[in-house]
Image: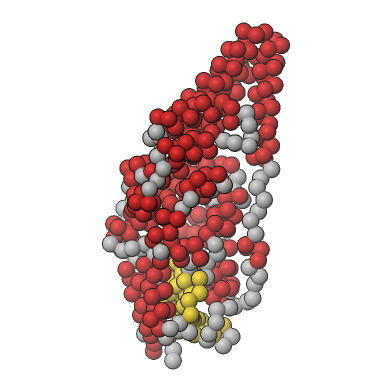
Amino acid sequence: MTESELMLPANVRQITVGEKNIYIVGTAHVSSESVKDVRDTASTVMPDTICVELCEARYKNITQPGTWKKMGIFRIIKEGKVLLLLAQIIMTSFYRRLGRRIGVRPGAEMIKGIEMARKNGAELVLADRDIEITLKRVWRYLNFWDKIQILAQLIISLFAVGRIDKQAIEDMKNQDQLEAMMESVGELLPEIKKRLLDERDVYLAQKIRNAPGTTIVAVVGAAHVSGILQHIYRDMPTEPLMEIPPKSIVIPILKWAIPIIIITLLIVGFLKGGTEHSIESIKIWILVNGIFSAIGAMVALAHPITILAAFAAAPFTNLNPMIAAGLVAGLVQAWVKRPTVADLEYLPEAVTTVRGFWTNPASKILLVVVLANLGSSLGTFVAGSWLISRLF
């Protein structure tokens, strides 16, 4: 039976790979039409397998809302996963607000795919790469300025969704528009497009290609369709796409170089200007670092005890590469205002507004860590420059 005889939705591509008939449903992640496309396609072709663009972590998050309650906030801070989690929360916030605006639950088309697999007795395949691996590969391949741009865009996304209506969402599924948009992204930030889109195209294509059964429905974001069609006809290894690149050697060098430079400046200052000069330099170092880190904690609306902890910790943590002011501030904030189960349950809803993001105890801890660290870093730059200027 041909595609037209099956009366498949317009956003479905039917292909044959070996003995397998594969139906790729290109969706938008907040689209009621996409949900209908998934339902109609699965009902029409009655597949052996349904592949969805989810990894294990995202599958649990979308099917088990209570997963947030199991979040070990102290462990996240100690393992240095705050920025990773914060990025995921901000993206969740963006999609939830967008979905609320047009009346569709984010990921509803993936949920429909899961439901149709259960209803029809089809095997469910989680076809996407683990989100933590994806984000780490994106982050570690970026240079410093690209990282600044990404952080800025994440922060901007907290404050506005923009004028996006249902028609705009449906237009996003148009392949010509998507290809033009991806080309623009690739020109501006090629590493992000490569890790976030191109690599996952290969991974998704191989998972779909190797899915069990002879009739397969694949539910994927429309931006991945052209890439999947490009890679699905040949067998390609996915192991290299799962490797996490080593951390840049520059950061560890800087972590040790900065305290060495500061201590050297203090020693030179003592030899050149005597005790009085050294005492003044130490005061500058303590006050500037402490004030900037405390301001970061204040911007996060931290508890007064946390602000004092950030102030007290920054001058010393900036001379110790093994610990950061944000780590101390975050642990203190978690201690003085430990999130309750109710706070964690409400977290997905809280992050849909700026006020909720800053007032929910769980998300506030993450903000305290990031902003106290940012303030501490700025304080080190300002204080270091000041000390150099006093010598020369």
Residue 231 image-quadrant placement = bottom right
Residue 111 lies, with reference to residue 380, above or below; the image says below
Image location (x, y in percent) of residue 198: 56, 63
Image location (x, y in percent) of residue 337: 40, 39
**Residue for point 28% across, 62% down:** 103
Residue 12 lies, with reference to residue 351, above or below; the image says below
**Residue for point 36% across, 44% down:** 360
**Residue for point 46% across, 58% down:** 181
**Residue for point 39% across, 61% down:** 65
Residue situated in front as seen by the camera: 338 or 304: 338
* Left or right of 218 on screen, residue 257: right
Q: Is residue 275 something one can see in this rendering?
A: yes
Q: Is residue 158 something one can see in this rendering?
A: no
Residue 231 lies, with reference to residue 301, above or below; the image says below
Residue situated in front as seen by the camera: 310 or 222: 310
* Left or right of 95 on screen, residue 311: right
Which quadrant, please, contains the C terminus? top right
Image location (x, y in percent) of residue 223: 47, 65
